[in-house]
Every structure is written in C-alpha cells, then in structure tokens.
Amino acid sequence: MRSSQGYADRVYFQGSLLDPDPGTGSGVSLAPLGSSVQRRELAQGAWVDVRPGWVRGADPLFLKLQTEVQWRADRREMYDSVVDVPRLLAAFGPRDEWPHPSLVAMREVLEAHYADELAEPFVSAGLCYYRDGRDSVAWHGDRIGRGRTEDTMVAILSLGAPRRLSLRPHDHGPGDTIGFVVGHGDLLVMGGSCQRTWEHAVLKTAK
C-alpha cells in the first residue's frame, strides 16, 4: 500500500506448517504492531520499519490473490525492442473494490499506528507478483505525487517465499547497499525521505 497517491502463470505454493489457518478458511488476522515493529534509521532522514509475522492466516490470503486477481504484465523499451517487465502487477485505487477485505483492515491498522507520522492516509494498493527468482524490479524510488518533494510512506506486505528487498542511497558508493529479507506474512514500511533519497530493488535470484 502506498500513501498519496490475463492471469499469472501457474505457480505451485507449499503452505506453511506454522500458519494457524493453513489454507482451509478465510481466517486472516493481524498481530499487534506497537513495540514489535523494529525500526532502522537510515541516512538523510530515511527509515525502514519491519514487523515479522504481522499477518496470521497468510496462506489463504496468498492463494486468493494469486488465483483471483487480474494480473497484468507491463512492457518497456530496451535497446531496439519492447520486452516484458519480469513481474506481474495489479493496482487498486480509493474508488476500487479491493480484492480482499483483510487489505482494507490492514490499511486501517497502518493508518492508526502511523497517525503521528503519516501526512495523509494510505489510499491505494499496488500488488506485485514475483513468480520465481527470475522475476525482479530494478533500482528505483516511488516518487509519485507528493512523494517527489515530501516525506511519504510505502508499506509492503510480503506473501509467499522470502525475497530480499535491497536499498541503497542515491549517492551510493561501494558497500552502501543494505537488504531486508521479508517472508510470508512480514510487514516492511519505508518512510521519511526514503523514496527521495534512497533507491530500492528486488533483484533476481538463483531460485
């Protein structure tokens, strides 16, 4: 979810043995935030919060989004040809019906938790589907709307296999890249100046 602002190929999913609702119902629940949120302060007024295991009952949520969302593939120019962007996307704005009621509940919980820091409500949800380690997104900052000039927040809920979110400052040098491995049901929030002064990416992996 972001403030201010044909179907996927078949992928087989192994449900978590530790998930309290392993794909048999719709019992998605949220663990408390509060002091369980771990903040890492970055340079130039940026920060990253992580709350491992925020979503309980994440298996059925993942499967519903995977199979029922109308995913689309973007294309972009590369050299003298047009190629597929290696991930699938879906977007939901304030006037759209979001694909699962738990996403609306998450938005409300996040707005309450970050009320003192959030300049405006979370109003949209962008879903990104990385089908395997070959899917990725290049270095970028989400400088959309007021995010070009002011502090904003981007909240990421990770579902499925763990992936590493890499970050580096715009004026990066050797050894400046850091990373957060987010797994099934984990929450990661980028805030402060992060979208203006840092870049993030999900890089390709061997699996």
Image (cartoon, rainbow, N blue to C red):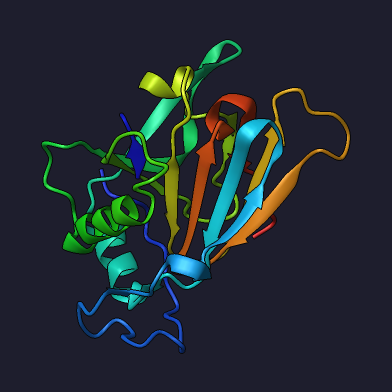
* Residue at 61%, 13% in the rendered image: 79
- Give how far across and how far down residue 74 sits, in percent: 39, 30
Give the side of residue 26 with respect to residue 120, left or right.
left
Give the side of residue 96 with respect to residue 62, left or right.
left
Q: Is residue 144 visible?
A: no
* Residue at 44%, 33% in the rendered image: 152
Foreground residue among 2 and 206? 2
Quadrant in which the N terminus is drawn: top left
- Give how far across and how far down residue 85 sits, in percent: 48, 32
* Residue at 52%, 44% in the rendered image: 190
Reply above or below: 138 against 97. above
Location of residue 49 by image quarter: bottom right
* Residue at 52%, 64% in the rendered image: 37
- Give how far across and how far down residue 38 sits, in percent: 58, 62
- Give how far across and how far down residue 20 sits, in percent: 36, 88
Foreground residue among 98 and 144? 144
Reply above or below: 25 against 5. below
Give the side of residue 174 with respect to residue 26, left or right.
right
- In the image as oriented, which residue stretches furthest toward the right? 174
Q: Is residue 7 visible?
A: yes
Foreground residue among 6 and 4? 4
Give the side of residue 146 with respect to residue 97, left or right.
right
Q: Give the number of callouts.
A: 0
Foreground residue among 175 and 121? 121
